[in-house]
């Protein structure tokens, strides 16, 4: 028996060690960026445009650009994603076609981001003649975000007790009335959480915006949806790889701002989830 | 009670949206195919698929995809060797060994890792990991396959860990209790009973992790050195399928052979990840039963 | 004894996928009666009830053959919405929406297009009164319905059904989760409702069927074995199987 116990102890130590090897770098990475980036963060940094070939000044246009792209992505992906999920959960019958739809959702989620970039370029920028623009970039990011929103909405809808629907139908409500009054209102928390999460991922993506919207240096803010725009992830990429003699503190600060934005959105999503869990009445 | 017209409209939109997803997958495939075929009109498919030289700007240009494919495979393989044991091990730790409070913290940390944008990891590769490896191993440059593999392994961990952890946690309690009833230790129950039952789910998680790694662009573009030759060792610079597209697209003229060739590379990527995801989904279905 | 036929079921066969739940059901339901449906578990009682308001169709695998006539009209020609407005149903476990008492009852009228606030408020009050719940909740109509007791919730379910002004009320083992006092209250309500509504009561409790119903049908394994006046069914049933069930030889 003692050898079995001994083996168990050894095994658990190895597992713990593996976990440590995973967890330590995560913490160190975050600390590393915060430590080195925090010093360069200032009000000017966040509110001014870059100067001196990106080596000085601030990253304001990139921050604005990312926020614009987030909003644009939400505008396109949210309605389409929610409606698709409603179809899958409330209307679709259990047949091959439905299975095809579900398979397509899975596939969309596995397509590499650069392939989305290619697709966005050829469809939105060229074919639909939108040019490299906020519109093209947002549309590309939206298609990329669809699977996450669809999945989150689907789970939220399925979590609503079936009895609500049964009650509604038995009183003579139509399917849409049932969804609108007895299902959707209770799925909104889950949908919201999933949406914020999906948008936080879109905010950090570089590949899809490389050819569809990202501008290298655009100190003025965009005037229409057909304009290009700077974006935080692209900016970080450019200053890390293509600007010689780049002061490291600015690069770290840019990475810091990007991470802070993404983490803030994640935090909002987590807080939303906790808040609605408390308010649940069933 | 008649359905109002507005209801017909809304239900129409809902049904259309349901089909939209299929439409997008087809659209992506179609557009990639369209431009790839433009290449295959003037450049033989066989030389594309099996050619060992990727020299898009030479005269005549060569578009052999093998160096890129091997670059992707090398870097992926390197990443997998690292992240599968670490990831599955961590999943086992979280699922079976860690006390409840620690479990929560660990899962949150993994979620934090999942949230880090890939460009930030690429940045870390350039500013710290690359130079670190260069000095430690006395390499000519830190921008090589190894740097890429390490960062990619890091990136794939959340996928592997969360899917594996779900699979392990999903094993019916009765299995565990039966094992304990026969006198097994927690480790024996974990190794001999729980792990095998969760194997379908874990395999699915690994496959999805592989898919993620093969499809990753920014990290490899920033740290693997971008030299599109067949790599002889992981300590050398190499080029992946993804980095090729991202890196060279900006330099091509729309409608040129090089341009179409990049779409062909995109098509190859699409097919590879399609197959991986399809297989992973099969394993996930198996696991759910 | 009222002899006006309100529902006529002809050769009804029901299937869930390959499984046959109802075999060749033929029966007539009379206006303003309380019809009891008894039988052991899985005999098709609930399936029969739910065929009357097409609630079975919510299940993807359901199919049926045969006809059901409502006042002479084939119900397959009536929309789901209109049919379910005519036939309210009370489920076995009290199921309320997580909204206020008022809104639970007001939901039915709302989906059928009643927008005038005063009208709705009158409908709600009348329905709660007829369900013997008004006195207990009239001062707290804003209370979330899930906070009511089981018996009160079930009476709330009756009220919300009454609010859509059905002609028929279906009860699917409505008292199975309730204490005797709540059960008695519901049985009293049923007695009062007889005047204006036709009621069909599916129950596992033969004594309840004996108390409440005028006619009673015995279902066994998807078949309607026998249907007759309640006292006759219980005291001298025509079929041996009925006799075995009501005397408790199996159940």
Image: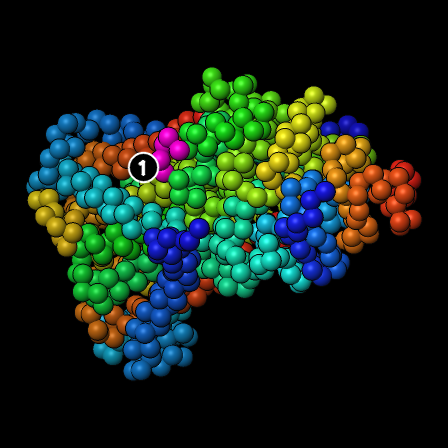
Residue B282 in sight here: no
Q: Is residue A89 magenta?
A: no
- The image shows residue C204, relative to residue A111, as above or below, that is above
Q: Which residues are magenta?
A: C115-119
Q: Is residue B248 left or right of residue C83?
A: left
Q: Nearer the viewer, residue A86 or B115?
A: A86
Q: Nearer the viewer, residue A245 or B102?
A: B102
Q: Position of residue B253 (x, y in %)?
A: 18, 69
Q: Nearer the viewer, residue C164 or A142?
A: C164
Q: Position of residue C240 (x, y in %)?
A: 91, 48
Q: Measuring 40% from the left and 74% from the top, which residue is drawn there?
A: B49
Mark 1 lies on residue:
A262
Q: Quadrant of residue A49?
A: top left
Q: Quadrant of residue C230?
A: top right
Q: Is residue C118 magenta?
A: yes
Q: Position of residue B11 (x, y in %)?
A: 40, 55
């Amino acid at each position: 028996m003692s050898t079995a116990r001994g083996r168990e102890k050894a095994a658990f130590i190895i597992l713990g060690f593996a976990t440590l090897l995973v967890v330590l770098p995560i913490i160190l990475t975050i600390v590393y960026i915060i430590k080195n980036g925090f010093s360069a963060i200032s009000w000017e940094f966040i509110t001014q445009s870059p100067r001196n070939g990106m080596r000085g000044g601030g990253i304001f246009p990139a921050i604005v650009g990312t926020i614009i792209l987030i909003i644009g992505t939400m505008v396109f992906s949210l309605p389409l994603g929610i409606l698709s999920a409603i179809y899958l959960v409330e209307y679709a019958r259990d047949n091959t076609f439905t299975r095809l739809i579900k398979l397509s959702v899975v596939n969309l989620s596995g397509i590499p981001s650069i392939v989305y970039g290619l697709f966005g370029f050829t469809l939105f920028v060229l074919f639909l003649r939108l040019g490299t623009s906020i519109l093209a970039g947002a549309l590309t990011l939206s298609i990329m975000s669809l699977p996450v929103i669809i999945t989150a909405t689907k789970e939220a809808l399925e979590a609503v007790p079936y009895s609500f629907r049964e009650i509604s139908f038995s009183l003579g409500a139509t399917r849409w009335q049932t969804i609108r009054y007895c299902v959707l209102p209770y799925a909104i928390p889950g949908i919201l959480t999933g949406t914020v999460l999906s948008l936080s991922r879109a905010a950090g993506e570089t590949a899809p915006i490389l050819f569809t919207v990202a501008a290298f240096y655009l100190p003025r803010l965009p005037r229409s949806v057909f304009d290009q725009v700077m974006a935080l992830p692209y900016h970080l990429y450019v200053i890390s790889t293509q600007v010689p003699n780049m002061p490291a503190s600015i690069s770290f600060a840019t990475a810091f701002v990007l991470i802070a934005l993404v983490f803030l959105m994640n935090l909002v999503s987590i807080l939303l989830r906790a808040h609605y869990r408390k308010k649940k009445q069933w | 009670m008649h359905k109002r017209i507005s209801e017909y409209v809304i239900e129409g939109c809902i049904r259309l949206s349901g089909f939209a997803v299929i439409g997008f997958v087809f659209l992506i495939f179609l557009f990639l195919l369209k431009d790839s075929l433009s290449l295959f009109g003037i450049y033989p498919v066989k030389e594309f698929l099996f050619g060992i030289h990727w020299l898009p700007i030479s005269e005549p240009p060569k578009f052999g995809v093998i160096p890129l494919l091997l670059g992707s495979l090398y870097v992926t393989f390197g990443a997998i060797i690292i992240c599968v044991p670490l990831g599955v091990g961590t999943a086992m730790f979280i699922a079976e060994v860690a006390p409840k409070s620690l479990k929560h913290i660990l899962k949150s940390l993994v979620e934090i890792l999942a949230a880090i944008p890939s460009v930030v990891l690429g940045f870390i590769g350039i500013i710290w990991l690359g130079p670190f490896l260069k000095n430690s191993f006395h390499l000519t440059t830190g921008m090589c396959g190894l740097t890429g593999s390490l960062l990619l392994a890091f990136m794939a961990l959340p996928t592997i860990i969360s899917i594996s952890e779900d699979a392990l946690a999903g094993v019916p309690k009765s299995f565990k209790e039966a094992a304990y009833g026969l006198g097994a230790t927690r480790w024996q129950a974990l190794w001999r009973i729980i792990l095998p039952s969760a194997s379908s789910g874990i395999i699915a998680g690994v496959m999805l992790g592989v898919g993620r790694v093969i499809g990753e662009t920014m990290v490899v573009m920033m740290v693997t050195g971008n030299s599109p030759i067949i790599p002889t060792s992981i300590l050398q610079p190499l080029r992946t399928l993804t980095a090729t597209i991202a890196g060279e697209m900006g330099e091509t003229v729309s409608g040129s052979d090089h341009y179409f060739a990049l779409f062909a590379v995109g098509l190859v990527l699409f097919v590879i990840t399609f197959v991986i995801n399809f297989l992973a989904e099969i394993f996930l279905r198996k696991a759910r039963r | 004894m009222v002899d006006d036929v309100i529902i006529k079921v002809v050769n009804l066969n029901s299937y869930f996928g390959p499984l046959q739940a109802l075999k060749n059901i033929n029966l007539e339901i009379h206006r303003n009666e309380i019809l009891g449906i008894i039988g052991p578990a899985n005999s098709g009682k609930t399936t029969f009830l739910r065929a009357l308001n097409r609630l079975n169709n919510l299940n993807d695998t359901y199919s049926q053959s045969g006809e059901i006539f409502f006042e002479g009209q084939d119900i397959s020609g009536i929309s789901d919405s209109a049919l379910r407005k005519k036939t309210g149903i009370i489920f076995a476990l009290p199921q309320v929406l997580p909204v206020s008492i008022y809104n639970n009852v007001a939901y039915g009228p709302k989906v059928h297009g009643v927008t005038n606030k005063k009208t709705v408020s009158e409908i709600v009050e009348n329905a709660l009164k007829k369900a013997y719940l008004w006195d207990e909740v009239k001062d707290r109509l804003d209370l979330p319905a899930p906070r009511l007791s089981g018996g009160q919730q079930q009476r709330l379910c009756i009220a919300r059904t009454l609010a859509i002004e059905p002609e028929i009320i279906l009860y699917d083992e409505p008292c199975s989760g309730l204490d005797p006092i709540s059960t008695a209250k519901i049985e009293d309500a049923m007695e009062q409702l007889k005047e204006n509504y036709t009621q069909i009561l599916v129950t596992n409790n033969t004594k309840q069927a004996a108390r409440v119903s005028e006619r009673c049908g015995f279902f066994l394994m998807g078949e309607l074995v026998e249907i007759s006046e309640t006292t006759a069914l219980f005291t001298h049933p025509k079929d041996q199987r009925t006799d075995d069930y009501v005397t408790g030889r199996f159940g």
